Image (spheres, coloured by chain):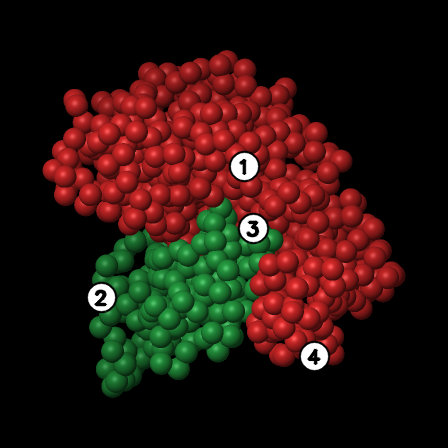
Chain colours: A red, B green
Amino acid sequence: MSQKRILLCAGTGCISSGALKARDALIEELNKRNMANDFLIVGSGCHGFCEQGPIFIVYPEETFYCGVQPEDAAELVEEHLVNGRIVDRLLFKDPISGVRVRNHREIGFYAKQMRKVLGNCGVIDPENIDEYISAKGYEGLKKALLMEKTAIIEEVKSSGLRGRGGAGFSTGMKWDFTYKAKGEKKYIVCNADEGDPGAFMDRSVLEGDPHAVIEGMLIAAYAINADEGYVYVRAEYPLAISRLRIAIKQALEYGFLGENILGSGFSFDLKIKEGAGAFVCGEETALLASIEGERGMPRPRPPFPANSGLWGKPTCLNNVETLANVPLILREGAQAYAAIGTERSKGTKVFALTGKINNTGLAEVPMGMTMREIIFDIGGGVKDNREFKAVQIGGPSGGCLPAEQLDLPVDYDSLAVAGAIMGSGGLVVMDEKTCMVDLARFFLTFTQNESCGKCIPCREGTKRMLEILERITEGKGEEDDLDTLQDLAIAIKDSSLCGLGQTAPNPVLSTLRYFMDEYKEHILEGKCRAGSCTNLITYYVFADNCIGCGVCKKVCPVDAISGERKVLHEIDTALCIKCGACIEKCKFDAIKTR
Amino acid sequence: MKEVLRCYAEDPFDYKPVEEVLVKFQGVKGALIPILQAVQEAYGYLPRQALEYVSVKQKVPFSRVFGVATFYAQFHLEPRGRYIIRVCQGTACHVRGGAKIMQALKDELNLEVGGTSEDLKFTLESVACIGACGLAPVIMINNDTYGRLTTEKIAEIVRAY
């Protein structure tokens, strides 16, 4: 085939950066020159490098273009596709060396990654099952269908795979419980209710490689004797849902789903359930209640879903990323899989790098890599050359780790000891401008909002904690507040019904542990060193930097800034509402807070 | 029950959309949430009459229907704007100034969070996280995502609608 392949990232990130418009412009340009038949333009899943979108890769030389806009189409066609000359200005520029990089493998962001689960994301067309199959897709299933069910479960157990959704429970054990549970009818459920703010790996896997998740579910279903399954996915992920629908339809046509799969006698029916927007539904019993059409409220365990789950039947729940690991384990063998990672955390983990970091995006690394390598080598370090302050890992259930913990190997057990959790793998990087007390308040606001209200410790306790944190950030904190916070946190952890409540105090506990000084400063000195708690700061003009350009004066919504042109300006603190508009506009860094 | 249904016959409310939804979901297990999703799709929100109709026809107590309808963030009991603006309040957006974006939208639209403009054009909402953290701060207007926002871009984006 003489057709050249051009791949464009068609994930949510790149689409909102204008990938489809750029694609249309490219097609139009090719049509103009009667070259449309020489090129195959393929939309792929997420490349993970959302910061640089829209991303185009031209094969066979694999030239990696980023930030491609519709107006670049003509030049791209003329220079690269016609004349074979690389368009330098659209190549990725290394933020540290300033060098333009041609092939994405040479970019630091990709060089240190080990893309297994994301192996197909950004490479194949997720809407075409043939591309999945030619990438060894459904081979794991074929292998599994020839194995004893107990042997499959043993294989997954010995791979060491642990749940990627949060708690890190052994996947093989979970399957084993469900397999051994009494009952004719059993279910498998894929938890795609990715609710942690700051995590989007499940969305990307569903968008970029939906068949891997379906194959994982099929293998699980076959092993535990389930003939029906659900994918419970957030309604906020429209693209993931539509790709999944297409994938299910194609898998049915090819005989991977439905009756008598590949002649094995095994039948499996897969349905999609759209979540209706409730964070608590990520908790397994709440999720099941939601599928049953009830309010998504958790119930006490035991009985565990493995024995009594959906409509009282034995049910196995696994997370998206967990299931996407399964075909890999079957295909390559448990031993090869377990060779990656640490003693008790095997395989790879996908992290979502966000916040004040240069390379935002998704990165997949072997378990046990240090936080420093992930943030600085892959993530490219802190934005605007600011000082690294903390990294928040594991979402609202996780914790904040300070710079001293940067050399911590990232695996389930080390993180737990340090006071955080793996969670779903969201990493939010913070610099000196982020106030840790305010961050704790932010997370408590979230869990408070999302608390389902069933058990008192979570419903009332998080509210009391939030009130205290609000007081502290407003400068009205009292000395015993810190003890009360600690006591409440421990009581809520001990007595809440489900994972949401039991982990809700973690952001507070970990910030108290590592950033006690900041809490004390807020309470005793009425000071916020990050300059973000508005009640505790005043704005002033830094005389050395002010050139009197008047931009701040113009943008101030309450006319609190005065001063003649080219003369030092002044802020009337009595009028100032601390909106920050002037800081944002000033090009000379002349407005500061204290 | 017959009496209740007779009442409906005299009600000027248009029951046709909800009737059609219920026909589609006949005999489906655990269908309350998909039913409410479809009813909301049809009416744009969940009118009280439609909820009552679902309750009677599905033989589910109204308290349960109401409970589910008010539990999930997706459901709305009041009419909403043609364009739903969802402002992401996720961690990544928070750290990159999501609160300022929200304030700018409130000012531009003269609305509070959860509010709908009088001409039923815009509804302003907050959303926990839309998973486009790489582009933080982010908003969604219906199904379109806008990322890497600054407060200055807000007016331009909103006015294009």
Say what secondary structure mark 4 lies in.
loop
Tag 2 and tag 1 share a subunit: no
Tag 1 near tag 4, CB within 8 Å = no
Work out whether residue A79 or residue A170 is closer to the camera in this orientation and state it: A79
Tag 3 near tag 1, CB within 8 Å = no
Q: Which residue is drawn at 83% across and 57% down?
A: A521
Q: Is residue B152 visible?
A: yes
Q: Position of residue A219 (x, y in %)?
A: 38, 27
User: Which residue is the site of mark 2?
Assistant: B20
User: Which residue is the site of mark 1?
Assistant: A95
Nearer the camera: disc 3 or disc 1: 1
Q: How many residues crowd mark 4 within 10 Å: few (<14), some (14–19), many (20+)?
A: few
Give the Cα separation between the discs numbered 4 and 3.
31 Å
Say what secondary structure mark 1 lies in.
loop
Query: Label 2 sits on what residue type?
Result: Glu
Q: Where is residue A535 in the image (x, y as percent from the top left)?
A: 74, 69
Q: Which residue is drawn at 73% across and 55% down?
A: A530
Say what secondary structure mark 3 lies in.
helix
Give the Cα separation between the discs numbered 2 and 4.
58 Å
Nearer the camera: disc 3 or disc 2: 3
Q: Residue furthest front?
A: A566
Q: Residue at x 36, y 21 (%)?
A: A140
| A488 displayed left or right of A101 | right
Q: Residue at x 61, y 62 (%)?
A: A586
Q: Can residue A186 be seen in this view?
A: no
Give the Cα separation between the discs numbered 1 and 4.
41 Å
Query: Label 3 sits on what residue type?
Result: Ala
Label 4 chain ID: A
Give the numbered dot on residue A575.
4
